[in-house]
Amino acid sequence: MRAYSTAFLAGNGDVAYDLLSQRCKERNTRPNFVMLVQQAGALYGPQEMRSLKVDQAAGDLARVTYT
């Protein structure tokens, strides 16, 4: 999650996409996702993650909340 958030907010769409689950990749094309991440990076820029909580974990699936 930390690596994904860092890549996302830095506008590095290729790295962020590679960190997505297969389920998420099936719902987002790489080109569209990369464009979205580039826009997010330009809008928000690098941010420090202040908190991270695993809300649910089962097998290879986890739901997290982070600030």
Image (cartoon, grey):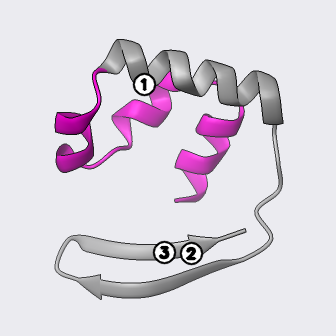
> What amino acid is found at the position of numbered circle 1 in the picture?
Phe
Is 56 situated left or right of 67 in this image? left
Q: Which of marks 1 and 2 is nearer the N terminus?
A: 1
In the image, what residue occupies the spot 37% across and 12% down? 31
Provide the secondary structure element on which disc 3 rests. strand
Q: For the residues labelled 2 and 3, say whether their Cβ atoms are less than 8 Å apart.
A: yes
Asked if the residue at tag 2 contacts the one at tag 1, i.e. Cβ–Cβ closer than 8 Å, the answer is no
- Circle 2 sits in a helix, a strand or a loop, which is it? strand
Q: Decide: is 51 above or below 42.
A: below
Residue depicted at x 70% and y 37%: 9
In-front residue for pair 60/27: 27
| Picture coordinates of residue 34, whole percent (x, y) | 48, 19
Q: Mark 2 points at which residue?
A: 65
- Horizontal side of residue 19 vs 43, given as left or right: left
For label 1, the residue is 33
Between 8 and 29, the residue placed more toward the observer is 29
Answer whether residue 62 is magenta in the image.
no
Instruction: Look at the image and give the residue range highlighted in magenta.
Output: 1-29
In the image, residue 52 above or below residue 3: below
